[in-house]
């Protein structure tokens, strides 16, 4: 299993994955929130999230260690099938069934995340204002939705699989949030523009009662929000890091932001 990270320095020693947070990303990540979450995670009875072996806070950085699951693959290493989507749907369902009241962590702040990137991008690659204006028409509705424990970053590299067993890793964005964010995250960050698999995933979410048909409009709005959020993030990262990979991510995110289908 390959691994890398944009927000942490990651090393592998004797089958122990060691992570050290990179302070540059503190401008948009609350690593103290992640530290608080890990303190509670080690006491929780669950099999959805990989539990750390140890962790500590030092010099305003989070250090953590995890058992390296060499018999697992990430979703970026394999072809995603309908069977895998079935497993992901069940994984999200199990995550959201955890008692969110047991976790004293931050609530996701929709306006704050957009403003952080908006205010820290010196040279926007496009005019974002029409998108901000559109988002502001409905973003406040998200804050009124019921809260669950939400991973908030279902990129392929954060979902591990071994046969039918799945587990989530990396808690940079962990928070209390509504149920739609993780569902939209898997669509916008992993399924991307595979319309067949997206439609199958949404159908499966309805079958498993993660959402109902009357809530699909809210899901569409959440997908649109995330398409904007990660387009901003990639613009920010390209400007600050000067790496072409972030420009490539920006181009793909912008294409989806402009042309995302309504489900």
Image (tube, grey):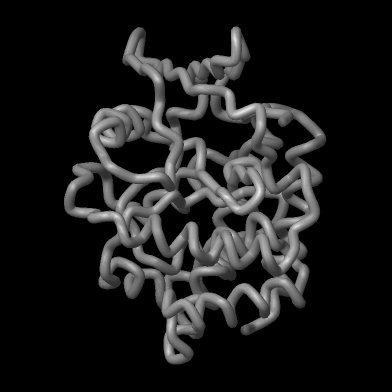
Q: As drawn, is 224 to the left or to the right of 62?
A: right
For image coordinates 29% across by 66% down, the residue present is 143
Image quadrant assignment for residue 254? bottom right
Q: As drawn, is 75 to the left or to the right of 139?
A: right
Q: Is residue 233 visible?
A: yes
For this rendering, which residue is in front, 256 or 19?
A: 19
Depicted 107 relative to depicted 35: above or below: below
For this rendering, which residue is in front, 110 or 18?
A: 18
Residue 85, image x and y in percent? 64, 65
For image coordinates 71% across by 57% down, the residue present is 253
Q: Is residue 137 visible?
A: no
For this rendering, which residue is in front, 101 or 83?
A: 83
For image coordinates 60% across by 8% down, the residue present is 14
Q: How many marks?
A: 0
Quadrant of the rendering where the N terminus is positioned: top right
Depicted 189 relative to depicted 261: above or below: above
Residue 170, image x and y in percent? 50, 36
Image quadrant assignment for residue 263? bottom right
């Amino acid at each position: 299993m390959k691994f890398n990270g944009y927000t942490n320095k990651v090393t592998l020693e004797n089958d122990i994955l060691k992570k050290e947070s990179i302070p540059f990303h503190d401008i948009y990540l609350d690593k103290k929130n992640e530290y608080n979450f890990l303190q509670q995670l080690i006491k929780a009875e669950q099999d959805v999230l990989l539990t750390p072996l140890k962790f500590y806070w030092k010099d305003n950085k989070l250090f953590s260690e995890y058992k390296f699951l060499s018999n697992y693959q990430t979703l970026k290493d394999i072809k995603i099938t309908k069977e895998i989507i079935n497993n992901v749907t069940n994984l999200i369902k199990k995550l959201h069934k955890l008692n969110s009241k047991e976790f004293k962590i931050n609530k996701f702040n929709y306006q704050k995340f957009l403003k952080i990137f908006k205010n820290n991008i010196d040279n926007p690659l496009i005019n974002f204002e029409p998108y901000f204006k559109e988002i502001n028409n409905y973003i406040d509705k998200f804050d009124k939705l019921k809260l669950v424990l939400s991973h908030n970053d279902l990129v392929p590299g954060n979902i591990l699989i071994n046969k039918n067993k799945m587990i989530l890793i990396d808690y940079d964005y962990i928070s209390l949030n509504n149920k739609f964010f993780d569902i939209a995250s898997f669509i916008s960050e992993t399924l991307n523009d595979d319309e067949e698999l997206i439609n199958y995933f949404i159908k499966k979410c309805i079958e498993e009662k993660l959402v109902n048909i009357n809530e699909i409009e809210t899901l569409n709005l959440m997908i649109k929000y995330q398409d904007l959020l990660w387009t901003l993030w990639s613009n920010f990262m390209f400007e600050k890091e000067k790496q072409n990979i972030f420009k490539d991510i920006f181009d793909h995110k912008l294409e989806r932001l402009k042309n995302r289908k309504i489900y």
